[in-house]
Amino acid sequence: MTVLTSDIVLERMMSLHPRVIDLTLDRVWGLLEAIGSPEKTLPPVIHIAGTNGKGSTQAMLRAGLEANGHRVHAYTSPHIERFHERIMLAGALIKEEHLTAILDECYLANGPDSITYFEITTCAALLAMSRSQADYTLLEVGLGGRLDATNVIERPALCIITPVSIDHEQFLGNTVSKIAQEKAGIIKKGVPVVVGPQLEDAMQVIEDIASLRHAPLLAYGQHWHVSRERDRVIYQDETGLLDLPLPILPGAHQIENAGAAVAALRHLDMPQQATEHALTNASWPARMQRLKQGALANLAGQAELWLDGGHNAAAGIALANHLATLPKRPTFLICGMLNTKDILGYLSPLAKQADKLIAVSIPNETNTLPAEVTATQASNAGLTATSAVNVARAIQEIVQVEPYSRILICGSLYLAGAVLRENK
């Protein structure tokens, strides 16, 4: 007799809808009603949308809330190594037995009706969180916002919109304004909205929708400011100034993410100690993560080995800016990307910061860009590029030439997940 596991149920769910992404809320509403409308009984919800920085902002916000003694549910996607990472109940990852039971309950309630993998697993997450006691629920949008499966909360306690830029054009639109329209779809009548730094076109859309829905704005550059001064973060809003430590998450872009998290915590009346812990205690894998131990780290020897899952043009710029701040040493990229991404937009900013790129295909991923194609696109972006059969081989090739180099594995969260599993 086969023992039911979460992997088995998740595999079944993959066959319920022929398309991986099909944005609509009708199927979600139907299943939520069938399982008792768990979205109506969640602890106070903070809903987070944006192109970049959602996960980091959520991680900092969670660290701040937990430092003040609050129990926090958190939902995020995609996962890096295991699906369980998507659902955190009162500060702990959902357990295998609980996950299997909740997934199976949703699968049986849905029956043969069409529903996407993300939609049904989001319903499962909401059901699990509704049955577990906590003080706050942090919901990260999967894609867009307006028609995302998480956008079923009638009145969140707070909404957050992190920087909006071009990504997922085939689903959200081919301009920043169109994408901002989708992201701002999470704004609810009368619910305050923390807004991170935005391009002018995106900000105009967000302001218009917030005004239409009478949602108070807490916007970067207007209602709060954040900057780095020497080795400190200076945050200021209408209630005063905070002198805070630098975020533990590396990169200049994390200053802005930290600002959004602090703005949210201040709105929730959290003390300064909570804001400090938000910056220093946050943990978010595959965001300029240094790999110092494990099988791949051992292959790197004396070389620095880093991992980052950013995958769009804005992420490429942020990554290049961060590399520019590090001590100089020969820098190599090991890159694998999905065939749905703007490869040139991502790689072009990195061309000035890397000596060479070695392209790989993402293992066990049907939508991977073949390594040879990534190498060609990297050459078009101005990088010296070759390909390798896998990440381990690429590391070996690099350290044979430059044993004290800096190696950055980058281009996709799916590649990051494969790397972390291999590095165990």
Image (tube, grey):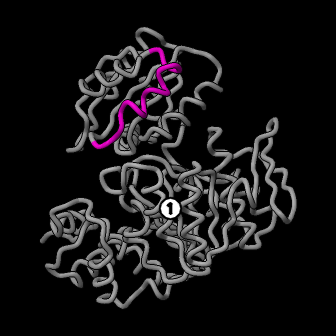
Rendered location of residue 282, percent (x, y): 63, 53
Say left or right for 40 vs 18. right
- The verdict on residue 257 being magenta is no
- The verdict on residue 345 being magenta is yes
Residue depicted at 19% across the width and 61% down the height: 19
Residue depicted at 63% across the width and 45% down the height: 254
Question: Which residues make up the magenta segment?
Answer: 340-355
- Image: 379 above or below 269: above
Rendered location of residue 347, percent (x, y): 42, 29
In the picture, residue 108 is in which quadrant?
bottom left
Residue denoted by label 1: 49
In the picture, residue 222 is in which quadrant?
bottom right
Local crowd at mark 1 within 10 Å, few (<14), some, or many (≥20)? many
Question: Which structural element holds mark 1?
Answer: strand
Rendered location of residue 100, percent (x, y): 30, 72
- Image: 397 above or below 419: above
Residue 246 versus residue 164: which sits nearer the camera? 164
